[in-house]
Each structure stands twice: as C-alpha cells, then as structure tokens.
C-alpha cells in the first residue's frame, strides 16, 4: 500500500478518526495505532513481520536487563548483544546473498562449490531503517537518554509505526516512544500544516520525480548507448533530483501523517544540493541517517578526538558502511568509499590551511556548490546503474562529448526546471505558503486539496511508481 495511493489516504483517514475518538484513553489510542501499523505492514509483506516480533522481543528483554543491571560489564554485554543481534538480522536477510555470490565468484576458479541459500525473498520491507531504529533505542537506554519503562507492545509500535515504517525517517525514542504516555493534542493550525506537508510530498513524488524518472532517467540508464553524451548528462542530473524529490516527498508524507497523530518527526532534508562542500551535503541529506551514523558509529569509533590518520579511517569506515547500508551490492560500498575519499581530502585540506574557513565570498561559495553538486551527480551514476559494468558504459558514453538533446521532452525540461528553481528558493517561502494554507477557511482548503489532486492526476501522465528508496 503505497503512501501515494488512494487506499493509503483512506486508511490514514480511518485511522485518524478512530485514534482521535479514543485519544484520551492511553491503551485504546495506542491499540488503534498498533493494529493499524500491523495491518499496514502485513499489506506489504505478511510473513516477514514475524522477524520484527522476534526482534522487538529480544531487544525488549535487553532493555529490561539494562534497567536492572548495575555492573558496567553486564550492561555493555547486553547492549553488545542487541547490536550483534540486529546487525545479524540485517546481515542474514539483506547481505547473505551478496556474501554468497561474492564467495562463489572468488572460489569458483579454485573448484570450490558454494551452495545457494537465498534469503533475499524473505527480506522484510524497511529492515534497514527498523534495525537502526532498534539499535538507537537500546543504546539510548544504555546511555541514560531513554527510559526502559515501556511495554513490549509499545516497543513493537515504536518500530512499526506505520507513517515511517517503510523508508524512515529514522526516529529516536525521544520523538515517538517517550511520548506514548502523553495525551496528544492537535490544533487546527497543526492539522492544516500536516495536510499541507502531505500535499507537498505528493506533488514532489507524483508530479516531478515520477515524470523525471519515467520520461528520461529510466530509458537513458536502461540503454545509454542509444543516447547522446549530453542526454546522459541531463539524465544523471535528472536522477539526482528524482532521488531527492522521491525520498524527500516520502519524508514529507511521513512527517505530515505523524503530525496528524500528534507526533513531531525530525526533518530529513534541508536543500542538500545547495551545500558548499561534502560535509555540509551530508548534514543536509537524509539527516536522520547521517545523524545516526554520527552518533552511533562515528563518535564511538573515536570521531575527531583521535589522531589525524584515525580520523580519516573513521570517516572512510562510516561512509563505506553507510554506502553498503543502502543495498546488498558492492557498488554501494564503492559509492560510499568515493564519498569517504572526498571527505578525507577535504578534511586534510582544512588541516593544511589551519582550520575550516569561516566565511567565503559569493564566488567561492558558488564554486563550492558547483563542485559538490558535480561530485554528487557523477557518483549517483553508480548508485542508479544496475551494476558496475552498466555504470562504466554510462560514464564512457558521457565522456564521448556527443551533443544533442532531442530525446529530452518539453515536460521533462519543465519538471527539471521546477525542481531546480524550487530547490533554490528560500525555505521561508515554503513555510509562508504553509501559513497561507492554514489561514484559509476549511472549505477553501478542501477546494485547494481537490485542485492539487486533479493537478497531480493531469500532470502525472505516468503510472504511479514505487518509491525509489524502497530498494535501499
């Protein structure tokens, strides 16, 4: 059940009505959310939900153990067990096939046969996000930043809360689990802003991202040899915006849907393509993942507190593992490694200069944005191509320098222009538009939403496509 579909919107409306009918009764309102979340997940993949029942049960026992344990050694052993367990789930269901295929390719020349034991067909939707969220809660309890006084069913709801279960954002316990005991409130203004956020997300996804994907990105990446170098370059740029609008659109819908139930989710994007360097880019892109990697991997590795070689090692480790998190394919590790090298070179340059520059003129800022965006676009080719061989073909085609843009339609140019301009506009305009929507009389808001729906139906001349980030 895609969150861009009519069935999802009906499901959301029914859950909303039931939730607020019983919102003053803690057990009832949490029961509505848990049943709705279970139904939503089962609509995606029924069998793998058992994985989360088991995972939540194991982590719940660990959390209760942390609440009772006094010995630092025992507490460390408990949190280590949880991390190993969750990463073990992720490794088994998401990466076992990758490791098997790698072993097959390495050992086949030696005459060693590796049996095929595929686990991919059992891969639960959203497993990467859920495992990271599960680890963050256990570690926060260990660090004293979250309470262990929650029931198993609350723990399960925290993992499976339906607005964000499929593709995030990764939500900390303080934003969801710790608020289960609070009686929720929803003002007319907050409700209006939530609906506005959902509408913006649907427009991003259905109108702009899907048109870019079906109108140019898919055909060019599918057969780059049939297109000119210029068309391949435009397709790479279009994919960069498609991925952003697709994922940020999903995040907008998730944030808006959560707000309808009184929960405030963290922002996941902050105009990342205006970043002046790669560090700034990763502080603006998929921020819930970036902050998770910082807090639960980079800092425990030593962060910036160790020697310069160790800092570079930490950066590379985080980026390679962060890349591999996106999918069971070594090209994601390579993509992460390239970003790790870029971050390492930038950090080294700052060390040579004596520190990060505090300010720069418009020319240097513009150059920094251009270089950063170029690195992002070129590395995204590896991200989008089905394998490294196809990525190599795509790069080779771009390098030929062949002109011609005959295969880029007017609609694609229009959507790409909208994507670029909207990305460059100040965030204040986005918030002001939301304020204007909220201040409209309810009947006028309803008319606006209907017009947006009709516009989506008219402009999105392609069949609704799955979210790009579902595959990651």
Image (cartoon, helix red, strand yellow):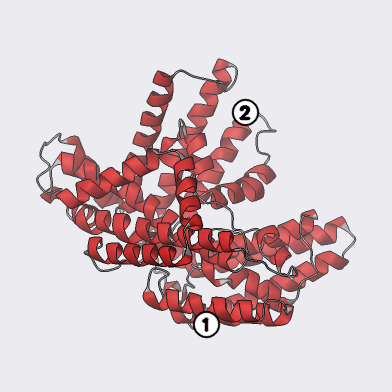
Q: CA distance from mark 1 to mark 2?
A: 50 Å
Indicate whether 345 appears above or below 143.
above
Q: Residue at x 78, y 54 (%)?
A: 143
Disc marking residue 280: none
Q: Is residue 337 visible?
A: no
Q: Quick check: can you spot residue 466?
A: yes
> Whole-percent x and y of residue 69?
87, 64
Q: Return the mark for residue 39.
A: 1
Q: Identify which residue, 325 or 461, lies in the foreground.
A: 461
- In this figure, what is the number of numbered marks? 2
Q: Could you tell me residue 327's position as x and y percent?
A: 43, 59
Give the residue drawn at x 23%, y 59%. 214
Nearest-to-viewer mark from 1 and 2 = 1
Q: Identify whether 7 is placed above or below 280.
A: below
The mark that comes first in sequence, 1 or 2, is 1
- What is the crowding at mark 1: few (fewer than 14 residues within 10 Å), some, or many (at least 20)? some
Q: How far from the left and from the top, in percent, is residue 465?
A: 31, 66
Quadrant of the snapshot with the C terminus: bottom left
Give the quarter of the figure containing the N terminus.
bottom left
- What element does badge 1 sit on? helix
Give the answer, above or below, for where 330 lies relative to 93.
above
Neighbor class of circle 2 (other Cα within 10 Å; few <14, some 14-19, many 20+) is some
Q: Based on the displayed image, in which of its 4 quarters is residue 211 positioned? A: bottom left
Q: Is residue 392 left or right of residue 328?
A: left
Residue at x 48%, y 46% (from the top left corner)? 432
- Circle 2: element type: helix
Does the CB distance between marks 1 and 2 fall below 8 Å? no
Question: Which residue lies under the disc numbered 2?
Answer: 308
The percent position of residue 283, horizontal first and vertical second, equals: 53, 41
């Amino acid at each position: 059940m895609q969150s861009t579909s009519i069935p999802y919107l009906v499901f959301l409306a029914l859950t909303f009505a039931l939730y607020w009918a019983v919102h003053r009764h803690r057990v009832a309102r949490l029961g509505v959310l848990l049943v709705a979340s279970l139904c939503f997940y089962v609509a995606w993949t029924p069998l793998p939900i058992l994985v989360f029942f088991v995972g939540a049960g194991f982590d719940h026992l660990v959390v209760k153990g942390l609440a009772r344990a006094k010995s630092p050694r025992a507490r460390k052993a408990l949190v280590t067990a949880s991390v190993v367990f969750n990463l073990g789930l992720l490794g088994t269901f998401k990466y076992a096939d990758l490791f098997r295929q790698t072993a097959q390719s390495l050992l086949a020349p030696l005459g060693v046969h590796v049996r095929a034991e595929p686990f991919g067909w059992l891969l639960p939707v959203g497993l990467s996000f859920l495992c990271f969220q599960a680890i963050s809660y256990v570690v926060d309890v260990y660090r004293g930043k979250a309470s262990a006084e929650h029931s198993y069913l609350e723990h399960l709801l925290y993992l499976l809360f339906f607005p964000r279960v499929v593709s995030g954002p990764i939500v900390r316990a303080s934003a969801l689990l710790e608020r289960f005991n609070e009686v929720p409130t929803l003002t007319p203004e907050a409700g209006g802003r939530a609906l506005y956020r959902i509408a913006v997300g649907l427009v991003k996804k259905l109108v702009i991202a899907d048109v870019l994907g079906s109108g140019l990105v898919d055909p060019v990446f599918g057969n780059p040899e049939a297109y000119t170098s210029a068309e391949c370059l435009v397709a790479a740029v279009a994919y960069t915006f498609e991925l952003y609008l697709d994922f940020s659109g999903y995040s907008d819908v998730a944030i808006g849907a959560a707000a309808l139930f009184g929960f405030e989710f963290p922002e996941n994007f902050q105009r990342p393509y205006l970043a002046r360097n790669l560090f700034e880019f990763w502080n603006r892109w998929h921020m819930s993942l970036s902050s998770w990697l910082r807090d639960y991997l980079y800092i425990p590795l030593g962060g910036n507190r160790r020697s310069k070689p160790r800092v570079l090692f930490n950066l590379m480790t985080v980026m390679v593992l962060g890349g591999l998190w996106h999918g069971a394919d070594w090209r994601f590790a390579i993509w992460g490694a390239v970003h790790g090298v870029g971050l390492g070179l930038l950090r080294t340059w700052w060390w040579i200069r004596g520190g990060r520059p505090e300010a720069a003129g418009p020319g240097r800022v513009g150059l920094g944005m251009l270089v950063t965006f170029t690195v992002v676009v070129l590395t995204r080719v590896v991200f989008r191509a089905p394998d490294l061989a196809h990525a190599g073909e795509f790069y080779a085609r771009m390098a030929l320098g062949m002109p011609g843009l005959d295969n880029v339609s007017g609609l694609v140019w229009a959507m790409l222009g909208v994507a670029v301009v909207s990305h460059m506009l100040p965030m204040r305009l986005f918030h002001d538009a939301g304020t204007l929507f909220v201040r409209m009389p309810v009947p006028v808001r309803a008319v606006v939403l209907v017009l947006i729906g009709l516009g989506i139906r008219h402009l999105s001349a392609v069949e609704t496509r799955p979210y790009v980030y579902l595959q990651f």
